Image (cartoon, helix red, strand yellow):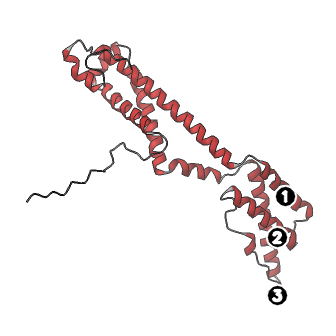
C-alpha cells in the first residue's frame, strides 16, 4: 500500500532569503531582480547589444555595486551586526554623558584611594568597603541605569568623606548629572536613527530600481517583441512577450 503521508514542505531558505529586517519583502524582491538582471547584462552575449542602446558596462557596474550594498545591509541586519555596531558606539560616550562618566569614575577612584589608605594602617576595624561604589561594573548600560548609578555614587561621595572630593567637587559632579538629565533622551536618538535608516534604505532601493529599469528599457529595444527570436532574451530580462516594456 503506498505511503499516503504528505511530504513536508521544503523550508530550506533560499540563498538570498533573509528574515524581516532592514528591507521589506517587496524591496527584497526588487534587490533580487536587480541582482539577476545585472548578472545577465554582464554576459558577453548581451553586453554589446545593451551598450548600443545606451546601457553601458559602467552603468551595469554601478548597478552591481548598489545591489551588493543592499545585500550587505540585509545580511548585517539579519546577523545583528548593524545593531552590534550601534551598541559598540555607545561605549564611546560623548558630550554630557562622557563628562558625567568621567566625574563618576573620579568618585570611584577616590573610594579606592580611601580603601588603600585605611588598609595601610593594618587595622581591620578601619577597613573601607568599596563594593557599593560599583567598581568594575559598566555604569552606562542604558540611560536609566546611568541616572540611577549617578545618584548612588553622588550620595556615597557625600556621606563617606572621600579624599580630594570636597563639596565643590561633588557639586561639579551633580552639575554634570543635571546636564545629562537635560540632554536629549537616547530613545529619541534611536527613533531618529531608525528614521534615517529608512530614508537610506528607500533611497538605495530607488536607485537600484532606476538602473534596473533603464537596463530593461535597453533590453526592450535590443530584443524587440516583434522579432520571434527575441523571445528567450525578453523572458530572461523580465520583459512582456507581446508588447513594449513600460516599467
Locate residue 155, reporting x and y percent: 83, 67
Vertically, is 98 above or below 27?
Answer: below
Q: Residue at x 70, y 55 (%)?
A: 143
- Which badge, 1 or 3, is on the more N-terminal residue? 3
Q: Nearer the viewer, mark 3 or mark 2?
A: 2
Locate residue 130, reporting x and y percent: 75, 75
* Residue 244 figure quarter: top left
Locate residue 219, reporting x and y percent: 32, 18
Question: Badge 3: how crowded within 10 Å, few (<14), some, or many (20+)?
Answer: few
Vertically, is 208 above or below 168?
Answer: above
The residue under label 2 is 156
Picture disc at residue 174: 1
Q: Is residue 216 left or right of residue 208?
A: left
- Which badge, 3 or 2, is on the more N-terminal residue? 3
State how far apart marks 3 and 2 are (Cα). Answer: 20 Å
The residue under label 3 is 125
Helix, strand or loop at disc 2? helix
Between residue 142 and residue 137, name the one nearer to us. Answer: 142
Q: Residue at x 81, y 68 (%)?
A: 110
Q: Is residue 145 left or right of residue 123?
A: left
Helix, strand or loop at disc 1? helix
Question: Badge 2: how crowded within 10 Å, few (<14), some, or many (20+)?
Answer: some
- Which quadrant, please, contains the N terminus? bottom left
- Which badge, 1 or 2, is on the more N-terminal residue? 2
* Residue 222 figure quarter: top left
Amino acid at each position: 500500500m503506498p505511503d499516503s503521508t504528505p511530504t513536508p514542505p521544503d523550508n530550506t531558505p533560499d540563498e538570498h532569503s533573509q528574515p524581516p529586517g532592514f528591507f521589506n519583502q517587496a524591496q527584497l524582491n526588487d534587490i533580487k531582480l536587480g541582482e539577476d538582471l545585472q548578472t545577465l547584462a554582464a554576459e558577453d552575449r548581451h553586453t554589446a547589444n545593451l551598450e548600443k542602446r545606451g546601457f553601458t558596462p559602467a552603468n551595469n557596474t554601478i548597478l552591481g555595486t548598489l545591489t551588493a550594498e543592499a545585500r550587505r545591509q540585509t545580511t548585517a541586519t539579519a546577523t545583528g551586526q548593524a545593531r552590534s555596531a550601534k551598541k559598540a558606539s555607545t561605549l564611546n560616550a560623548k558630550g554630557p554623558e562622557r563628562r558625567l562618566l568621567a566625574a563618576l569614575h573620579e568618585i570611584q577612584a577616590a573610594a579606592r584611594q580611601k580603601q588603600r589608605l585605611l588598609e595601610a594602617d593594618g587595622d581591620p576595624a578601619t577597613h573601607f568597603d568599596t563594593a557599593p561604589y560599583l567598581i568594575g561594573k559598566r555604569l552606562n548600560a542604558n540611560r536609566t541605569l546611568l541616572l540611577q548609578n549617578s545618584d548612588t555614587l553622588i550620595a556615597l561621595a557625600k556621606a563617606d568623606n572621600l579624599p580630594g572630593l570636597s563639596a565643590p567637587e561633588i557639586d561639579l559632579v551633580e552639575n554634570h548629572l543635571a546636564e545629562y538629565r537635560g540632554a536629549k533622551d537616547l530613545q529619541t536618538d534611536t527613533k531618529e536613527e531608525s528614521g534615517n535608516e529608512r530614508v537610506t534604505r528607500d533611497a538605495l532601493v530607488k536607485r537600484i530600481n532606476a538602473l534596473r529599469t533603464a537596463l530593461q528599457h535597453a533590453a526592450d529595444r535590443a530584443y524587440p517583441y516583434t522579432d520571434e527570436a527575441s523571445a528567450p532574451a525578453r523572458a530572461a530580462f523580465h520583459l512582456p512577450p507581446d508588447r513594449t516594456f513600460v516599467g
